[in-house]
Amino acid sequence: MNNKISVGTLALTLLAVTAYIMLTEITLVFGTVVMPFAVYLLLKLKQQSNTNYWILFFSFLIPALLFLSPLAATCFLILYMVTSLLSYTLEKKLSQEITIFYATFTLALSTMAAVVVLQMLGFLRPLSDIYTRFREWYGEQLTAVSDLTPDAIEPDLILQSMDLYYQNLPAFLVIGAFFLALYIILIVRVLPLESSKMWPYRSFDKWMMPRILLHLYIIIILITLFSGSFEESTISLYSNISIIVESAIFIHGLAFSYYFLLSKKVNKAVAILILIPLAILRPITIFIGLFEMIFRIRLIMELRRK
């Protein structure tokens, strides 16, 4: 590791981290857009000088805690957590797929923990209170509109859908964290680090989810069939886990479909085009993923080739 860093790298890193914090103060969307570039420059700085990497951390953390909002300080901490994780995976030469999933759960769990801590310290109102007030206000608007067009809108159905989305908010947060992790890693790969090799890459058709997800999915289905006497919090937990597992099986189904098309000598561009409707028709792709996990079709195809 080189303790000397270029002035340009340090200046760009300072600018990127400052832009990330300032834009996060405005809106999380802007901060998310800038985050991969800040991660890339911090990775570059860490590889050149680990000492300066941590000096920069405390140089930003103390002013952020004293003068900025708790949200901005929390987002800065998450930025460094993700950067340190990616640096670790590069040092250990972990695969890109494992890195994506590590980054996904780091982002999701750190965000959930941050929300809980901010609520405990009183910096953030409980999400249940925020949602309840919003639901009451939105319900009044729906009632007013339904009085004018009674056949076009069903307020109760819309509110039930909103309740379902709120109940499954942690699962949707994990899914959003997956796409953010994918975005960060793709940007870092596009802007390669000079002093380090990138994560070993496997093409999408080689992606395979652990078969234990099949067993977990079956267990969740069986529990759901007998969930009539369960508490609402227990049902919500199983519902969130089910959405996450289904999303993993969905990715498995897409990857197997791509593998199957390529094995049948379909042109790669045509195969990608065929994946588009499969990505839209999620239930069909989940069924394909489950079917492959149950009957091990990929393994059978590979054994036949031999």
Image (tube, helix red, strand yellow):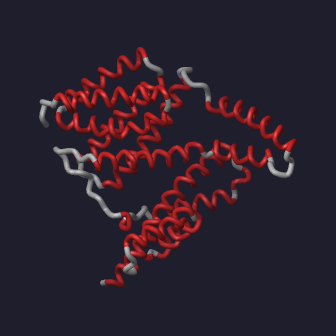
Quarter-of-image position of residue 57? top left
Residue 251 in the figure: left or right of residue 10: right
Residue 74 versus residue 86 in the image, above or below: above
- Which residue is painted at 40% across and 27% down in the image? 21
Identify the residue at image location x=37%, y=45%: 184
Give the quarter of the figure containing the C terminus.
Answer: bottom left
Where does residue 174 sit, x and y in percent of width and height? 50, 46
Q: Identify the image quadrant of the N terminus.
A: top left
Tag count: 0
Q: Nearer the viewer, residue 30 or 247?
A: 30
Q: Is residue 99 above or below residue 29?
A: below
Q: Residue furthest top?
A: 66
Q: Please provide percent x and percent y for residue 158.
A: 74, 47
Give the left or right position of residue 98, taking residue 10 as reference. right
Question: Left of 213 or right of it: where is 168?
Answer: right
- Examine the rendered structure and indicate whether residue 239 appears above or below residue 221: above
Instruction: Please give the name of the residue rendered at 47% of the width and 26% of the height, measured from the top-left corner.
Output: 25
Q: Nearer the viewer, residue 34 or 4?
A: 34
